[in-house]
Amino acid sequence: GRQPWLVHGVLTTAQAATTVPGSIVALSLGMYLALYAVLITAYVSVLFYLARQAGREEPKQAPAIGPSAPPLAGAGANG
């Protein structure tokens, strides 16, 4: 944000310093960390849930291809 202006001498370091107390900054950081911890926990639990659901499905049989395959529906003498 402000760093390029400090480099070029437009804004002094004293003017760039915030007046927000450190406790508010720490609280804000803690809230962001807690939010991201909840989100990553939800994400991982959904991934494990989906993996369990995929493991319970019965494997689908591949369709038969070749001479032993049943005739296609609608295929007649004129087809």
Image (tube, rainbow, N blue to C red):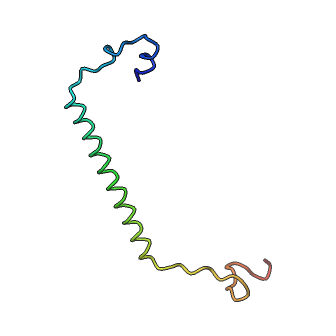
Which residue is most to the right? 78
Residue 57 spot, x, y in % from top left:
44, 76
In this view of the protein, which residue sits in the foreground, 20 or 47? 20
- Quadrant for the C terminus, please: bottom right
Residue 52: image location, x then y, percent? 39, 71
Quadrant for the N terminus, please. Answer: top left
Q: Position of residue 27 (x, y in %)?
A: 22, 36
Residue at 25 percent of width and 35 percent of height = 28
Q: Residue at x 69, y 80 (%)?
A: 72
Residue found at the very far top of the displayed protein: 10
At x 27%, y 37%, the residue is 29
Residue farthest toward the bottom in the current orientation of the protein: 68
Residue 8, above or below 38: above
Q: Quadrant of residue 68?
A: bottom right
Q: Position of residue 69 (x, y in %)?
A: 68, 85
Residue placed at 30% from the left, 50% from the top?
37
Depth order, front residue of 2/61 = 2
**Measured along the vertical axis of the image, is residue 45 above or below residue 13?**
below
Total labels drawn: 0
Q: Is residue 35 above or below residue 69?
A: above
Observer-nearest residue: 9 or 65? 9
